[in-house]
Image (tube, helix red, strand yellow):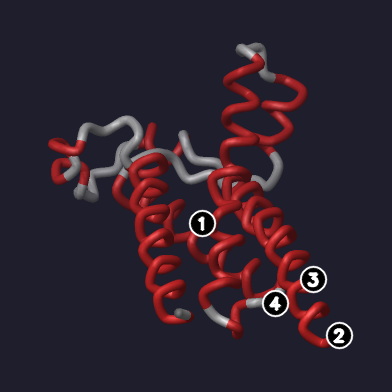
């Protein structure tokens, strides 16, 4: 029974990562044009469109942006919610990934991979604030599963 649950969780994780990849890397690119974006021809505009300053985008969306509130919320909250399932699923898959530090590091690494792919292949723009928000999302996804696991293990001991 345990192996079936692990297989199902692994399949859910793979489906989640595929959907996340589509939403992050290929949101503006039709699947038929993906191959054309694997190039290294960077122009000056490409490097200006990236953000390497922590909290710059977050501050902009919270206090300075003169754009629709829905767009600001979608950008900030979307980055958090998008990575919450990752923080939820990982501790269920392996006991060695049940520590907050491990989930945080794994979420940060996954987010960094997406950001670097966007930077290198111009699938979007690199934003250090996305790293911060995505990692926060993984942590927030971890909290409910940790509480659930705590109650399950505390009942078994009684």
Query: Residue 69 at what x, y percent from top left?
Result: 66, 16
Q: Quadrant of residue 151?
A: bottom right
| Image quarter hosting the N terminus | bottom left
Which of the two discs, 4 and 1, labels the residue nearer the N terminus?
Answer: 4
Q: Can you tell which of label 2 and label 1 is closer to the viewer?
A: 2
Crowding near pointer 1: few (<14 within 10 Å), some, many (20+)?
A: many
**Residue in the picture at 54% in, 80% down:** 94
Q: Can you tell which of label 3 and label 1 is closer to the viewer?
A: 3
- Compute the Cα span from label 2 to label 1: 39 Å
Give the labeled residue for mark 1.
111
Give the labeled residue for mark 3.
151
- Compute the Cα span from label 4 to label 1: 18 Å
Tell me the element at label 4: loop
Left or right relative to 123: residue 16: right
Total numbered circles: 4
Q: Can you tell which of label 4 and label 3 is closer to the viewer?
A: 3
Is label 2 in contact with label 1 (beta carbons under 8 Å)? no
Tell me the element at label 3: helix
Residue 65 sits above or below residue 87 on the image: above
Give the labeled residue for mark 4.
99
Residue 158: which disc? 2
């Amino acid at each position: 029974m345990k192996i079936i649950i692990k297989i199902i969780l692994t399949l859910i994780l793979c489906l989640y990562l595929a959907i996340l990849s589509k939403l992050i890397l290929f949101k503006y690119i039709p699947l038929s044009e993906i191959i054309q974006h694997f190039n290294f021809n960077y122009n000056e505009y490409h490097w200006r469109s990236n953000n390497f300053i922590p909290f710059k985008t977050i501050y902009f969306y919270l206090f300075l942006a003169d754009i629709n509130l829905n767009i600001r919320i979608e950008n900030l909250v979307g980055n958090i919610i998008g990575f919450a399932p990752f923080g939820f699923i990982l501790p269920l898959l392996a006991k060695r990934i049940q520590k907050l530090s491990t989930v945080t590091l794994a979420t940060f690494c996954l987010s960094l991979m997406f950001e670097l792919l966007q930077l290198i292949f111009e699938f979007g723009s690199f934003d250090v604030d996305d790293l911060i928000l995505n990692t926060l999302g993984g942590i927030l996804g971890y909290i409910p599963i940790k509480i659930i696991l705590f109650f399950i293990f505390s009942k078994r001991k009684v």
